[in-house]
Amino acid sequence: MSAPAIPAAGRAPLYAGLFLTTAATLVVEILDARLLSVLTWYHLSFFVVSLAMLGLAAGALRVFLGGERYAPARAPAGLARHALAFAAARSARRALRR
């Protein structure tokens, strides 16, 4: 097993970005579950959250089986790109709802 491609000093921003992205996703899921349980049937919110968790697991499986595409050296750039896409998608959704 080789040493990590990211130096120790460069891991802190990566972990901070990963934490913030994961926390934002969790907050969105909790808010969606609360809103759905108020606006629709209570059981439907659990179904939607289960589907979201299935999607997260599918993404994790894709990364696990992705091979070189998800190498540790490419993680910072990929995290930044996907976090920006997540923020843009959430902002666009918010803008379209109004």
Image: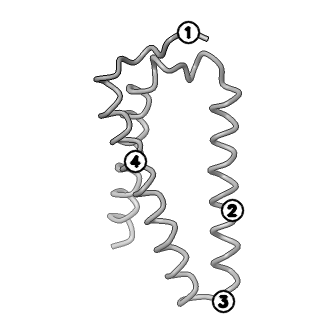
Return the residue nearer the eye: 19 or 69: 19
> Gap in Å between the C-alphas at discs 4 and 2?
22 Å
Q: What type is the residue that disc 2 sits on?
A: Leu
Which residue was labeled with disc 3? 41
Q: Earlier in the sequence, mark 1 or mark 2?
A: 1
Q: Secondary structure at mark 4?
A: helix
Q: Which mark is residue 19?
A: 4
Quarter of the image with the N terminus is top right
Q: Earlier in the sequence, mark 3 or mark 1?
A: 1
State left or right for residue 50 relative to residue 80.
Answer: right
Q: What type is the residue that disc 1 sits on?
A: Ser
Q: Earlier in the sequence, mark 4 or mark 3?
A: 4
Callout 2: 10 Å neighbours few (<14), some, many (20+)? few
Instruction: Give the residue drawn at x 65%, y 19%.
Output: 67
Instruction: Give the residue drawn at x 48%, y 61%.
Output: 26
> Gap in Å between the C-alphas at discs 3 and 1?
51 Å
Callout 1: 10 Å neighbours few (<14), some, many (20+)? few
Q: What type is the residue that disc 4 sits on?
A: Phe
The color scheme shown is: one colour
Instruction: Give the residue drawn at x 31%, y 33%.
Output: 12
Q: How far across and how far down the image is residue 92, in percent? A: 36, 56
Q: Earlier in the sequence, mark 4 or mark 1?
A: 1
> Gap in Å between the C-alphas at discs 1 and 2?
36 Å
Q: Which mark is residue 51?
A: 2
Instruction: Give the residue drawn at x 65%, y 70%.
Output: 48
Q: Secondary structure at mark 1?
A: loop
Which residue was labeled with disc 1? 2
